[in-house]
Image: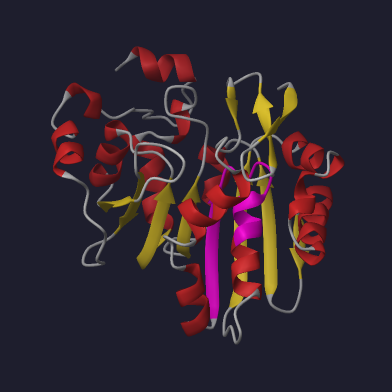
Amino acid sequence: MDKLSLFPTEDGSVTFWSDTFQETFHSSHGAKHEAEAKFVIPAKIAEKASTQTQLNILDVCYGLGYNTAAAIACVSELPDPTASLHIIALENNLEVPQKAIASGLVDIWQPAIAQILKIAAETQTITTKNLSLQLLIGDARQTISQVPSKWADAIFLDPFSPPHCPQLWTVEFIQLLANSLKPDGYLVTYSSSAAVRTAMLTAGLQIGAIAPIGRKSPSTIAAFAPTALPPISENEAAFLKTRAAIPYRDRNLQSTAAEIIAIL
């Protein structure tokens, strides 16, 4: 089982350090700020919630629940939201959200949102008048089969980094994500890896860049054509023609991290 320890971030929020993956669950720049700036805002959650009757979000690697919480907060703060919010969250280790509750990490959110995260960690499902949240526990490569085709208005892709968790950055897994995405939906992630971007292109998506937040490199947004996206730079485009752009492969969706890296 992963050993988790508290790690303070620059915006006053706290995240976990994973001993197994040797990474924090969120950026040291600010866990709460990252959830908003790298996921909720680029995916146009506010705009979609104001114009649709239903808004569907797939949160891949739920972790502490911060990305889900940021989306709920965004919609709840709108003056007149029209959409009911439906979230399916994938998480491999139920201990992570449960320890986040026990350690008070969710208390940075409004009490009503913190309570939603607490119930989700305890029961893995919550349904209210304008919200449904389902937390699916297990390997995301398998649990994603429970997500309907062309269901998601937005996909938050937030695993540990590609070198440490290549299983969730492969052509095959990203193809499953693309299959779950609506024609006008957005897939957003913090990674700007050329290998990850190549996997997205291979899955039939186009890619764009999200302005850097707390780091030098931009993040990535992907969508189907003809959805307009902010362009990547010439330097980023050049990286897509190098060896660094060789994508991870996991043809049977069961390979270990070591096996995936070994075949690069």
Left or right side of 168 for 1: right
Q: Residue at x 43, y 62 (%)?
A: 43
- Between 205 and 190, which is closer to the camera in this rendering? 190
Q: Quadrant of residue 181?
A: bottom left
Q: Residue at x 73, y 58 (%)?
A: 109
Q: Residue at x 69, y 71 (%)?
A: 131
Image quarter where the N terminus lies is top right
Image quarter where the C terminus lies is top left
Residue 200 in sight here: yes
Query: Magenta segment range?
Result: 54-70
- Where's residue 33, x and y in %? 57, 51
Give yes or no for residue 68 being in the magenta stretch: yes
- Where's residue 121, x and y in %? 79, 48
Residue 205 in sight here: no
- Between 249 and 245, which is closer to the camera in this rendering? 245
- Where's residue 190, x and y in %? 43, 43
